[in-house]
Amino acid sequence: GCVPFTPVTGPRLLVSGATSLGTAERLARKRLLARALKRLPEQLGVSGVHITFSEREEWLLLAEEGFERRLGLQYHWQNRAGWRCFEDYLADLKQGRRKAIRQERKKVANAGVVVRRLRGKQIEQRHWDAFYQFYLNTVEEKWGQAYLKRSFFDEISGSDLGESVMLIVAELADTGELVAGALNFIGADCIFGRNWGCSQQFDSLHFELCYYQAIEA
C-alpha cells in the first residue's frame, strides 16, 4: 500500500486529540507509533516501511528512531503576483520565454489536438479507460511498476474525492480519439499534478497538459 497517493506534505503519525496535547505528550505518542511501525515489516513479511511527505517534526522524530531520512525534489508554481489569467502570467515573463511558451501552445493547437479539462462527473468511463492505458504506457517507458489498478480510478470518482479530481485530456479534433491525459487533485488553494501518459507523441503536448493547463485552471 501507499499513503498518501498525492505528493502532499502533512502529518503521517496520527494521534487522537493531537491539537489539545502539549508538544512533549504529542511527540511521545508519535514516537510510540514510530517504534510500532519498525516492527511491521517482520510481522507482515515485507521488506520495509516508508513514510513519505511527512512534516518536518515527524521527519526529525523518525530519524531519531532509526528511519532513513528521505529527501525529495518538487517543483511548485505559485501565483505570487495575483495573476488573473494565463496572459497576465506571460506578461511578467521575459520576452524570449513568453514567446517560447506561446509557440509551444500553438504547436499543440496546430497539430489538430483539442485539450479539455474535466472535473468530477464530467469524467466518463471512456476517459478513465483511456487514461489507464496512458498510465500503463508511462510505466512501461520508465521501467516502473503499475501499482494502480483500473478499479482505482472508479473508486476515486465515486468517493468524496470525486469533485476534487481534474483530468486534463487531449483528443484528436477530427476523430475524438483520446491520445493523452494528466491527472490532478484539487486542494483548497492549489492543484497537485500526479500522473501523465499518452498513446501518441505530439510536440509540446506534455507541457501543455501537465503545466500550462493546470496553471490556466
Image (cartoon, helix red, strand yellow):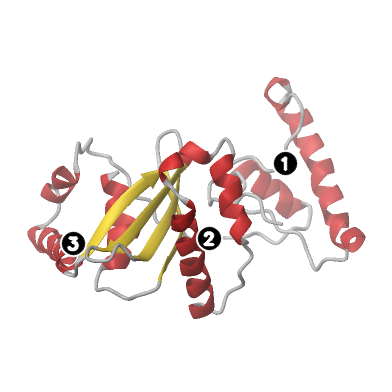
Q: In this view, does 46 lie to the left or right of 60?
A: right
What is the C-alpha distance between the residues marked 2 and 1?
A: 19 Å
Q: In which quarter of the image is the N terminus?
A: bottom right
Residue 21: where, in percent of width, then height? 74, 23
Residue 171: where, in percent of width, then height? 30, 62
- The residue that label 1 is drawn on is 13
Number of numbered tags placed on the structure image: 3
- The residue that label 3 is drawn on is 105
* Residue plotted at (75% across, 36% down): 27
Looking at the picture, which amino acid does disc 1 mark? Answer: Leu
- Circles 2 and 1, Cβ within 8 Å, touching? The answer is no
Q: Which mark is on residue 157?
A: none
Number of the front mark, 3 or 2: 3
Q: Which mark is on residue 72?
A: 2
Mark 1 element type:
loop
What is the C-alpha distance between the residues marked 1 and 3?
A: 43 Å
